[in-house]
Amino acid sequence: MKAGAYLRAETLQQALEALEKGGCMVLAGGTDVLVKARERDPYGEKTLLDIARVPELRGLNETEGALEIGAAVTLSEILESEKVKRAAPLLLQAAFQVGSTQIRNRATLAGNVANACPAADCIPALLVLGAAVELQSTAGRRTVPVEQLFKACPACLRHAGMHVKTCFFADPMAQKLLLKPGELIVSIRVKKQQPEEKSLFYKLRQNANIGMAVMNLALAGKLDAQQRIVDVRASMGGLFAKPCLLESCVAPLIGRKLTEEALQACAAAAAERMDAGAKSLADFAYKRAVMPQLLTDGLRALFWNVPIDGEEEPI
């Protein structure tokens, strides 16, 4: 890495003014940025803008219907938060699956989103929870649903294969997110889960300990008094050109009890979704075979408490 400038922002305003000038690469936890810097020279003369100690980005606050998690809050801090344990257990499950303790001590939730890796663990959970990002520049502030934040990136899937590593783009915030010039993710708003809502996160990986996901799955749903499914949301990572909810795949379940017949309808819809949107995958045949099974296994685990093979104990 060339000896470009380094700037540690002390305030949010200082960070936004630096971004307005251009030529900055945002650094928070550095678990992706610094890996790329060691492997090659991706940043040239860009200024590394360190936002890790900006006080305005360090909050983890609870409102009536949501949690607001600052862009500099680490995954370890999320895992230790009683607010998150109480209000968003699905996010807790996903955050626990990111890397090792050392990585989670540095990595941030906003960084997991900003890196936009096709197999990122927290993004499917955020989609299922209806999360939104707060973006700010010197020109103002706006809120964008997480589902609307990403550009389609078929190249990621062609290069990923089963061994999905960190995004190979030097600056994924600029190349894979729908940001306006000078914008920074300042926080992520996560809707609170309702007490009666069930949720599940599962990560399929080759390395049993800390490997990147081959695929991952986030689910949440509710049953009525007659055990009919009144709500179910699903998202999977490592499959499509941009993160998305799998609405068509779980639509056959709404208003029905979970039966093997209903699960087969879900599996058929999932196979159709793969055929329609994932053929650019480097390992399409493998994932086309596994994805419907993983989805239906996850639904059994969610509503019937049948463990997925190899599922880790929840934290």
Image (tube, rainbow, N blue to C red):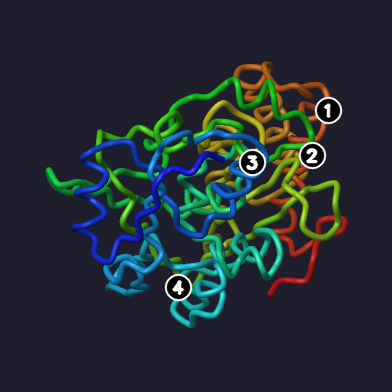
Does 41 sit above or below residue 27?
above
Which residue appears at 78% of the width and 48% of the height?
A: 204
Q: CA distance from mark 2 to mark 1?
A: 12 Å
Q: Mark 4 sits on what residue?
A: 87
* Front residue of this view, candidates 302 and 11: 11
Query: Sequence-wise, which precedes: disc 2 or disc 1?
Result: 1
Q: CA distance from mark 4 to mark 1?
A: 36 Å
Residue 35 in picture, x, y percent from top left: 63, 47
Q: Are marks 2 and 1 in contact (CB under 8 Å)?
A: no
Query: Sequence-wise, which precedes: disc 2 or disc 4?
Result: 4
Residue 144 in picture, x, y percent from top left: 30, 43
Q: Secondary structure at mark 2?
A: helix
Q: CA distance from mark 3 to mark 1?
A: 21 Å
Residue 218 in picture, x, y percent from top left: 61, 51
Q: Mark 1 sits on what residue?
A: 286
Q: Secondary structure at mark 4?
A: helix
Q: Secondary structure at mark 1?
A: helix
Q: Mark 2 sits on what residue?
A: 293
Q: Mark 3 sits on what residue?
A: 166
Q: Looking at the rendered structure, which numbered label has been put on residue 165?
A: none
